[in-house]
Image (cartoon, rainbow, N blue to C red):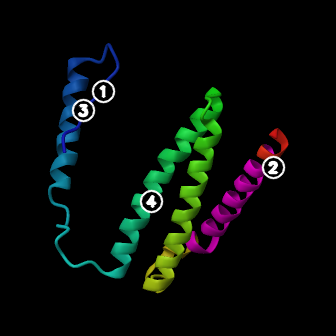
């Protein structure tokens, strides 16, 4: 994968060179990553699926927040999309985790499913309540 480096105006040639060298080092390190052709265990498959969903939800959340702050016409539909996809992804990941029995393999990461996931469920429900009530009040 190629990277495009964006630097502020006025950045010295020396700083640009050092940044380019740092990126080349990172690319070299990534060249030694584990090949994805190896068989995956349930924890790796679960982690990959969860990470992809989390990235999508993060982008949707930021877009929703920006849309709300900017007062865009599609801000509320963006929040609905974020909340529907986010809750769906959360429930899907819970189901996968239970089905694959990854809890015993989480180690110190047990904190997430034990405390963060219930909080996220509550937040999604509260956002749905707010969206439904605000729509009912607008009619």
Circle nearer the N terminus (4, 1)? 1
Label located before the other in sequence (4 or 2): 4
The residue segment tinted magenta is 112-134
Give the mark, 2 or 1, whose residue is nearer the N terminus.
Answer: 1
Taking the spot 79% from the left edge, 44% from the top edge, the residue there is 134
| Residue indicated by mark 3 | 4
Q: Nearer the viewer, mark 2 or mark 1?
A: 2
Identified at 71% across, 55% down, the residue is 128
Q: Quick check: 118 above or below 84? A: below
User: Alpha carbon of mark 3 to alpha carbon of mark 1: how far?
Assistant: 6 Å
Q: For the residues marked 4 and 1, what is the alpha-carbon distance in whole angstroms?
A: 27 Å
For label 4, the SS is: helix
Question: Does residue 21 lie above or below 42 as drawn?
Answer: above
| Viewer-nearest residue: 121 or 18 | 121
Most frequent secondary structure within the magenta stretch:
helix
Do the numbered discs 2 and 1 sit on residues whose CB atoms are within 8 Å? no
| Mark toward the viewer: 4 or 2 | 2
- 126 falls in the magenta region: yes
x, y percent for residue 85:
54, 57
Residue 6 got which mark?
1
Q: Could you tell me how far apart the alpha carbons at marks 4 and 2 are, in whole angstroms?
A: 28 Å
**Horizontal and vertical percent position of residue 131:** 73, 48
**Which of the 4 image quarters holds residue 25?**
top left
* For the residues bearing labels 3 and 4, Cβ distance under 8 angstroms: no
User: Marks 3/4: CA distance?
Assistant: 25 Å
Q: Name the residue under label 4.
A: 53
Circles 3 and 1: CB distance less than 8 Å? yes
Q: Which residue lies furthest to the front in this view?
A: 139
């Amino acid at each position: 994968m190629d990277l495009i480096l964006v630097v502020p105006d006025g950045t010295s040639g020396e700083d640009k060179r050092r940044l380019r060298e740092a990126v080349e080092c990172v690319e070299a390190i990534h060249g030694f990553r584990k090949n994805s052709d190896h068989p995956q265990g349930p924890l790796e498959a679960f982690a990959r699926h969860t990470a992809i969903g989390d990235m999508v939800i993060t982008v949707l959340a930021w877009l929703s927040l920006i849309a709300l702050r900017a007062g865009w016409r599609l801000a509320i539909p963006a929040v609905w999309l974020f909340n529907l996809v986010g809750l769906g992804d959360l429930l899907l990941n819970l189901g996968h985790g239970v089905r694959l029995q990854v809890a015993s393999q989480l180690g110190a990461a047990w904190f997430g499913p034990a405390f963060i996931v219930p909080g996220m469920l509550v937040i999604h429900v509260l956002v749905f309540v707010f969206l439904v009530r605000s729509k009912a009040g607008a009619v």
